[in-house]
Image (tube, helix red, strand yellow):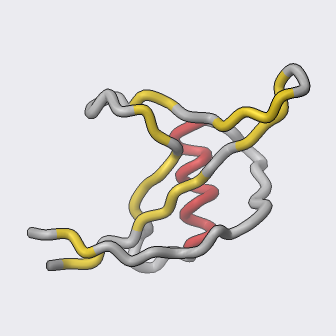
Amino acid sequence: MKTVNKVQAFIVGKIDSKYKILIFEHGITKIHQCIRGTISSDEDIIYAAIREIEEESGLKNVRLIKNLGTKKLLIKG
């Protein structure tokens, strides 16, 4: 088994007085998901989160409010 470092970001915004979470349909799997991606071996977790947000949503100048922690998953293969 190998360890793969991933980051996931929850984008929250207020629209019409209601808080909403940004989700999208993945282009290949067609699964609805929040923003996520692989952390490069030389990359900081915070930088990785911001990079994934910019790459997948097109949002710029984002602000991280809180780090919700980490979880280690082992991938077969």
Outermost residue toward the right in this view: 17
Outermost residue toward the front in this view: 18
Answer left or right for 73 relative to 60.
left
Residue 71 in the image: above or below residue 31:
below
Residue 17 in the image: above or below residue 11:
above
Q: Which residue lies at the image location 52% right of the left edge and 57% below the top edge?
A: 8
Answer left or right for 38 relative to 51.
left
Q: Where is residue 51 in the image (x, y as percent from the top left)?
A: 57, 55
Residue 11 sits in quarter: top right
Q: Position of residue 35 (x, y in %)?
A: 52, 46
Image quadrant containing the C terminus: bottom left
Depth order, front residue of 11/49: 11
Q: Position of residue 34 (x, y in %)?
A: 52, 43
Q: Position of residue 15 (x, y in %)?
A: 83, 25
Image quadrant containing the N terminus: bottom left
Residue 71 in the image: above or below residue 30:
below
Q: Which residue lies at the image location 35% right of the left edge and 33% below the top edge?
A: 31
Q: Which residue lies at the image location 75% right of the left edge and 60% below the top edge?
A: 64
